[in-house]
Amino acid sequence: MLENEQTSRLAYGFVCQSMEFGIITLEINHMTTLTATTARKLEVKDFKADVPPDWCPGCGDFGVLNVLQKACAELEIQPHELLVVSGIGCSSNLPGFFRSYGVHSLHGRALAFATGAKLANHHLTVIVTGGDGDGYGIGLNHFIQAMRRNINLTYIVMNNEIYGLTTGQVSPTSEHGMVTKSTPMGNLEQMLNPLALALASGCGYIARGFSGDPRHLQKLYMDGIQYPGFALIDVFSPCVTFNKQNTYHWFRDHVYRLEDNGHDPTDFHAALDRAIEWGAKIPIGLFYRNPNPRPSLDQLDPALQGEPLVLKPRGLTAEQRRALVEEFM
């Protein structure tokens, strides 16, 4: 918690001046945008936006949002120290329903935007949300590169195995043979395995949850947010409107918890074995947590040491300008 009568530089480098009664007000261009209380423990309501979610009734994304709000409250992350970034899709509307800094970016480019934000201010907690089409389709390259670079952020993918926003086309995680609007004779392609891909790309924290099991999912969120590097949490989030195959009932019949079966999340090869398991039973839980986490990119880059880039003085001195001119002449 920040104390009263303290001036702090937070978020994107803007100045926060504490006010009376334990309230901190963040002002940007003389416009108050966020307030954060410091006099009490954070609650779920502190992360609820004024705009209510407009997903279809029963959508799995409601569970994803509710659990994320609970996790952030439990972790005592101040809303003005948190950035939630999304791409395009039903699930990518989440930042608008979550009280923090938020960006609804371009299709498949959420991780690229989040990378820039995290490197500009490594003091921010950065969470990325999106769907299987956004993250594992058009955004697949950014997904791989962010894991390879080990950007210190948490990526929550609402995997409903369908393109919901465009009303029901086959997605990268749709099962072989699945009938959709774009595959009326059945999906000819094999489904992408994001967990196995994450393992091969060097991701240090890999988990899968189910929005119908909120307590289990919250633990995965909290651990992933605290992990010192890129964390992937793939979430089965049923699309009740356009996916009539992978329903809540279907998932409850198929999923089982890894921790109930003695899985060792520090064992890379065991994690890979479980990641490719898909059939009568499908595992959820923590697949892999690197017991020796490699440094994140912001820890390795000399230019990012100390205070965030956004707080460092901008511009060049006369001596620096002369040195640059001489170097390139």
Image: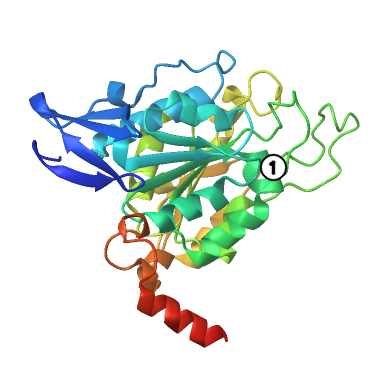
In the figure, is residue 217 to the left or right of 182?
Answer: left
Taking depth in this image into account, of 86 and 67 the one nearest to the observer is 86
Q: Is residue 187 above or below residue 317?
A: above
Residue lying at 45% horizontally and 47% vertically, measured from the top left: 258
Which residue is denoted by mark 1 in the rendering? 173
| Residue 253 rendering spot, x and y as whole percentages | 57, 30
In the figure, is residue 2 to the left or right of 153?
Answer: left
Local secondary structure at mark 1: loop
Residue lying at 51% horizontally and 59% vertically, measured from the top left: 271
**Residue 134 image-quadrant placement:** top right
Taking depth in this image into account, of 286 and 8 the one nearest to the observer is 8
Residue lying at 27% horizontally and 34% vertically, measured from the top left: 26
Q: Residue furthest right?
A: 185
In the figure, is residue 50 to the left or right of 1?
Answer: right
Here the colouring is rainbow
In the figure, is residue 41 to the left or right of 138?
Answer: left
Taking depth in this image into account, of 309 and 98 the one nearest to the observer is 309
Amino acid type for the residue under numbered disc 1: Thr
Q: Is residue 249 above or below residue 14?
A: above
Q: Is residue 163 visible?
A: yes
- Point out the image quarter for the N terminus: top left
| Residue 308 rendering spot, x and y as whole percentages | 32, 58
Q: Is residue 272 visible?
A: no
**Residue 130 image-quadrant placement:** top right
